[in-house]
Amino acid sequence: MSHDQRDVIVVGGGISGLTAAWHLKNAGVDVCLLEAAPRVGGVMQTERRDGFLLEKGPFNVIVREAAFERLLEEVSDDVEVITADRAARARYIYRAGNLHAVPSHPIALLGTPLLTTSAKCRLLAGLCASRRHGAHEETIDQAATRRFGREVADTLVSAAISGIYAGDTHRLSLKACFPNVWRIDTKTRSPLAHGLVSALARVAKSRRASSGNGRGAASKPRRWRGLISINGGLGELATVLGKRLGADLHTRCRVETIRATDRGYALTCTTRAGTDQPYACRRLLLAGSVHEAARLVAPLSSKAGSILRSIECASLIVLNLGFNRSDVAHPMKGYGFLVPRSEPDFPLMGMLWADSIFPHHAPKDRRLIRVFMGGSRDPEAASRTDDELLAQALGALRPLLCISGDPVLVDVCRYRAAIPQYVIGYAEKINSLRSALSEQTDLHLIGNYLQGISINDCVRLATETANQLIPPAG
Ligand SMILES: Cc1cc2nc3c(=O)[nH]c(=O)nc-3n(C[C@H](O)[C@H](O)[C@H](O)COP(=O)(O)OP(=O)(O)OC[C@H]3O[C@@H](n4cnc5c(N)ncnc54)[C@H](O)[C@@H]3O)c2cc1C
């Protein structure tokens, strides 16, 4: 059987692999993307059902990275980028059987029942001036407690982090999870002063840009801000990128083994027909999940394989639940709510009010909610049946949102070992991984276990890695 010989092969067609392959193809590199599933997108999948638009994995993206903005620009002929409804600015935290608005300014902070008076005083004092980061790597909980006190760390901070990492603030590293926040934490005594100075700098920059005095791309006004999605769902972004790869995208093609050769790498793959299809390439980019990368890399470097295998990941369950509008008495106006670690008996991690954020996600006479379960809060959840998960979710939601009828739509998606946990020592682990792989010069890893888990982070790393593989012009 003849090899399909390429310059670059990308393994894995989630947003990381698609971004890298698209950049390479666009730059004229001979590239091919191999994806095990029948369609691209990885965890980024959208389904239309009964008039609902169901985001099965990620729901929205905060536009933060220039690389992600550029990707949106590049596909904007084929997809419509939409911004979240203003209503989505209101966010809630579950506490003692009720939902409380997250205070968004100092006056609201004084009135919130989420914190005791002494915790509010401690928070305000910490915002004005508090101790900087010391010499040792700290957990998010340690840093938040040092700055703002125990109650804020247990309530506001733990809830926010569970919504991002599905993890435990007592184990996650501030430096690894939020390097920008960590940098600020090492520099400033006053988070408030830092916030004010940064806000003023942003205003001055946007004035310069809109008055046309800015120079170069850095001062170009931003086209998208805040929370965005794609009109047809995030899965549409993946589909469009996949289509642009054309015949260089091979779906239903699972890479089974990788072997180093004197001309690069030889791959064996199981294809749709179940046959072993050989591929070969000079340079290889692995864009699958961390544990899949561990399996593929282990024969090349057992040390790298075991480091990758040792990376802990949280499992997550997403339930999309549709209801008749008349059956939900709660207005559900806002982004949704998160649950802090101080509420260990509540069975959910949190919930998004999907059609309040993007109204076209549900028909006018329906409501759509996205429930998150599992994470470090409930690691066993992924092994429960759909019926058990649904019963547990409805038991918690009915009294909270005053829901009378049964759901008209139920969709349960399990994501096993999907969210890498950037715990204390993570940066050292990734450094050891890089040095273990340093002899494999033309092997590159991308994905959410390296430099951040968000779609922004994945796109940035994939773009930077692809750029390294593109020969300089001229
Ligand atoms: C439930 C959930 C909700 C999330 N919500 C958000 C959110 O709202 N906003 C946000 O910014 N981020 C969110 N994230 C994080 C973000 O979506 C992911 O980190 C990101 O999409 C991961 O993309 P990826 O391409 O690196 O990996 P994946 O999406 O996991 O893609 C990997 C691909 O590789 C393929 N593959 C694996 N092994 C092989 C093989 N041997 N051969 C061929 N192909 C292979 C897989 O089939 C898969 O398609 C969420 C994550 C989850 C799980």
Image (tube, helix red, strand yellow):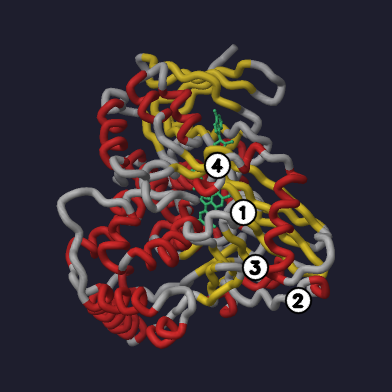
What amino acid does circle 3 point to?
Trp
Q: Bin the neighbour count of mark 2 within 10 Å (Cα to Cα): few under 14, some 14-19, many 20 and up.
A: few
Q: Mark 2 points at which residue?
A: 329
Q: Which of marks 1 and 3 is nearer the N terminus?
A: 1
Q: Which of marks 2 and 1 is nearer the N terminus?
A: 2
> Which residue is depicted at the point 56% across and 63% down?
76
Residue 33 is labelled as none
In the picture shown, does residue 321 fall above or below 210?
Answer: above
The residue sitting at the top extreme is 1
- Name the front one of labels 4 and 3: 4
Q: Bin the neighbour count of mark 3 within 10 Å (Cα to Cα): few under 14, some 14-19, many 20 and up.
A: many
Image coordinates of residue 418 in percent, x first then y, are: 53, 41
Asked if the residue at tag 3 contacts the one at tag 1, i.e. Cβ–Cβ closer than 8 Å, the answer is no
Q: Is residue 265 visible?
A: yes
Marks 4/2: CA–CA distance:
31 Å
What amino acid does circle 4 point to?
Pro
Q: Mark 3 points at which residue?
A: 353
Q: Earlier in the sequence, mark 4 or mark 2?
A: 2
What amino acid does circle 1 point to?
Pro
Is the CB–ligand 1 distance for label 3 below 8 Å? no
Q: Name the residue under label 4.
A: 379
